[in-house]
């Protein structure tokens, strides 16, 4: 039997209802702040991610689905949304539009990872990007919007961590300083941390080893090494969050997946999720558009995982789905008349379903009840019996009177 590939899943109709709620909240919250929806291709030139996510990242090193298009060109299923959106910004000359250009997306992404709860090979993200504004109010706006989305979805036990990565130059100096510190304390470090001091010293902050953690308490922190402008930018972001009543923790060890993050980085997580606790995160990427051969352009954005939000959300209410009319028929009656009534009812703005399964009349009425139909039109050899399922009343009508009768009833209801 052929099954869905490992790490993928079907979104069945009953699952889709909860996703539709997320989409509606996203569209409302981001739309109200001037963000407009964008959709980019499911695959891109591999080079876009190599340059736009960074050669040294886990995503590019280990997680991409890359293939040859048959003509010698390397393509990759998109593992994230920021680089494609920035590519589109450059390609369509969006720097000529009033800035910032505020965009959002809700799309599926692909990463070759070990599947587990909350971690899939094809998953969905909602994301927002504000491109062309460098002020701290942009960062704060984006963080507030994600906080509002998570609150609207009643995502449980959410905490927000923020930090600043400064700029690539101070970061490089800091990395060297941190590596020196780690070399001085090599004996107190776990072997896997020791092995990566020069490769990726920042990872030492993620270690779960007790003596390593104790050593890292006293390690130099990037937040203490920021340039004056970067420190001022970060202070302003924090002040705006304070004013907006958004609680956060400073996490000097917060490292984000992209190479080109500058200044603000943030991450929302939920303890309701267990091991894969990240719900969504993002940051500022002021060097990224240049990396993609665009004009120097500041940018900031975030992405949040739909499956993780679904896992951590308290019962998402789903809109009740109404069926105004179910069109049944006695076995000897014309199926063309039944078909015509269902079509006309929908043209008149009603929701109407037609019996297609060849059930007995009793079975059809049972089915109408099961789907919650308000009316059942039973097409007879001549005329129609219209049954009001709420009151149980039944009346004999000419075919032409069926829809006006339901519409009148709907107006009275
Ligand atoms: P993680 O630490 O869980 O690997 P990440 O840092 O790789 O997360 P981002 O690239 O920041 O995640 O993506 C933003 C969000 O997308 C994550 O917070 C998470 O909710 C979701 N996400 C990332 N990878 C996956 C995946 N493989 N399956 C499901 N959701 C994912
Ligand atoms: Mg990851």
Image (cartoon, rainbow, N blue to C red):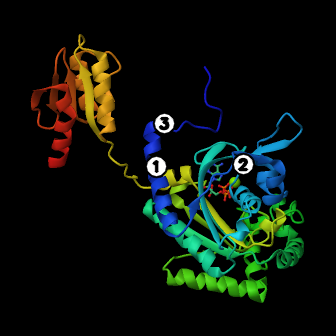
Is residue 409 at all visible to an observer of this figure? yes
Is the N terminus in the top left, top right, bottom left or bottom right quadrant? top right
Q: Is 232 rendered above or below residue 360?
A: below
Q: Nearer the viewer, residue 323 or 18?
A: 323
Q: Is residue 359 above or below residue 109?
A: above
Which residue in the structure is indicated by mark 1? Answer: 20
Dot 2 or dot 3, earlier in sequence: 3
Q: Write the residue at 83% across / 74% down.
A: 168
> Which class describes the residues within 10 Å of circle 3: few (<14), some (14-19), or many (20+)?
few
Q: Which residue is mark 3?
A: 12
Residue 273 location, x and y as percent?
54, 55
Q: Residues within 10 Å of mark 2 (few under 14, many from 20)?
A: many
Q: Which mark is residue 346?
A: none
Dividing the picture into quadrants, the one containing residue 404 is: top left
Kindly state the secondary structure of the residue where label 3 is placed: loop
Residue 94: quarter of image? bottom right
Q: Where is mark 2, residue-wise?
A: 78
Which of 61 and 128 lies nearest the eye of the viewer?
128
Q: What element does badge 2 sit on? A: loop
* Residue 330 spot, x, y in % from top left: 22, 15
Label 2 and label 3: CA atoms lie apart by 23 Å
> Do tag 2 and tag 1 residues touch (Cβ < 8 Å)?
no
Q: Residue at x 31, y 25 (%)?
A: 340
The answer to whether the residues at label 1 and label 3 have Cβ atoms under 8 Å apart is no
Q: Is residue 281 visible?
A: no
Alpha carbon separation for disc pair 2 and 1: 22 Å
Marked residue nearer the N-terminal end (1 or 3): 3
Residue found at the far top of this picture: 332
Left or right position of 10 against 329: right
Is ligand 1 closer than 8 angstroms to the Cβ of mark 1?
no
Q: Secondary structure at mark 1?
A: helix
């Amino acid at each position: 039997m052929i099954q869905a590939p490992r790490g993928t899943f079907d979104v069945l109709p009953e699952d889709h209802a909860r996703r539709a709620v997320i989409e509606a909240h996203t569209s409302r919250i981001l739309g109200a702040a001037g963000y407009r929806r964008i959709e980019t291709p499911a695959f891109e030139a591999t080079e876009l991610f190599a340059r736009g996510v960074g050669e040294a990242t886990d995503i590019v090193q280990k997680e991409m689905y890359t293939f040859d298009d048959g003509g010698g060109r390397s393509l990759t299923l998109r593992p994230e949304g920021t680089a494609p959106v920035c590519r589109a910004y450059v390609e369509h000359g969006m720097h000529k539009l009033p800035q910032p250009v505020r965009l959002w997306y809700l799309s599926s992404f692909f990463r070759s990872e070990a599947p587990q709860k909350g971690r899939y090979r094809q998953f969905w993200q909602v994301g927002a990007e504000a491109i062309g504004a460098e002020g701290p109010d942009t960062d704060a706006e984006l963080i507030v919007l994600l906080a509002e989305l998570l609150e609207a979805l009643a995502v449980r036990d959410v905490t927000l961590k923020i930090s600043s990565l400064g700029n690539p130059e101070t970061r490089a100096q800091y990395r060297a300083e941190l590596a020196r510190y780690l070399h001085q304390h090599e004996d107190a470090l776990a072997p896997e941390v020791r092995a990566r001091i020069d490769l990726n010293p920042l990872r030492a902050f993620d270690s779960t080893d007790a003596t390593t953690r104790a050593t890292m308490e006293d390690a130099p922190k990037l937040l203490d090494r920021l340039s004056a402008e970067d420190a001022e930018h970060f202070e302003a972001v924090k002040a705006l969050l304070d004013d907006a009543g958004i609680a956060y923790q400073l996490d000097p060890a917060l490292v984000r997946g992209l190479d080109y993050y500058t200044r603000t980085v943030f991450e929302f997580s939920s303890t309701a999720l267990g091991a894969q606790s990240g719900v969504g995160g993002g940051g500022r990427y002021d060097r990224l558009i240049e990396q993609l051969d665009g004009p120097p352009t500041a940018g900031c954005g975030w992405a949040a995982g739909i499956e993780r939000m679904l896992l951590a959300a308290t019962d998402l209410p789903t809109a009740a789905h109404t069926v105004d009319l179910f069109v049944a028929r006695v076995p000897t009656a014309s199926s063309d008349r039944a078909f015509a009534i269902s079509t006309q009812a929908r043209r008149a703005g009603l929701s109407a379903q037609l019996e297609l399964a060849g059930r007995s009349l009793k079975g059809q009425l049972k089915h109408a009840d099961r789907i919650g139909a308000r009316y059942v039109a039973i097409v007879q050899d001549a005329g129609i019996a219209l049954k009001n399922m709420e009151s149980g009343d039944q009346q004999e009508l000419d075919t032409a009177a069926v829809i006006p009768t339901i519409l009148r009833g709907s107006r009275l209801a």
